[in-house]
Image (spheres, grey):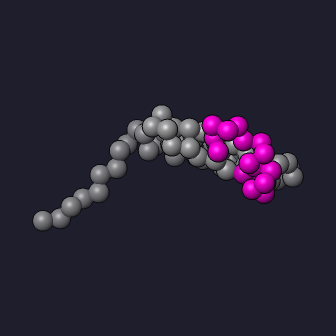
Amino acid sequence: MSDSLRIPDSIDTQRLQAMQLVAKMKESADKHGIGFIGGFISPDGQKFIMTNMDDDDTQALLPDNLK
């Protein structure tokens, strides 16, 4: 008896696409030497954040509800 992996389709696809968009924005900021912090909160409440700044700057710029 073999267990197969079950991967939810739509939410994972939407989350992956959103993560890719944030990654592209960060890459563009890196290319132009601009500080970047961006992300999203998924419908299930999971937070995804990418930045090219150090942790102290990131924490100072994030609103309290995203920390």
Instruction: Say which quadrant the N terminus sits in.
Output: bottom left
Q: Is residue 60 magenta?
A: yes
Q: Is 2 on the left-hand or right-hand side of 57?
A: left
Instruction: Say which quadrant the C terminus sits in.
Output: top right
Q: Is 65 on the left-hand or right-hand side of 58?
A: left
Whether residue 29 is visible: no
Kindly identify the residue that appears in the image at 70 percent across and 37 percent down.
Answer: 63
Specify start and end residues of the magenta stretch as a single range: 51-67
* Residue 29 screen position, x and y as percent: 80, 48
Q: Nearer the viewer, residue 56 or 51?
A: 56
Kindly identify the residue that appears in the image at 63 percent across and 37 percent down.
Answer: 65
Kindly identify the residue that appears in the image at 21 percent across and 61 percent down.
Answer: 3
Q: Is residue 25 magenta?
A: no
Check the image and name the residue furthest to the top. 43
Q: How many marks?
A: 0
Kindly identify the residue that appears in the image at 60 percent across and 39 percent down.
Answer: 40
* Residue 22 screen position, x and y as percent: 65, 44
Q: Is 56 on the left-hand or right-hand side of 42?
A: right
Q: Nearer the viewer, residue 37 or 24?
A: 37
Task: State whether residue 29 is above or below residue 2.
Answer: above
* Residue 30 screen position, x and y as percent: 80, 53
Q: Based on the displayed image, in which of its 4 quarters is residue 64 positioned?
A: top right
Whether residue 30 is visible: yes
Check the image and name the residue furthest to the bottom. 1
Check the image and name the residue furthest to the right. 33
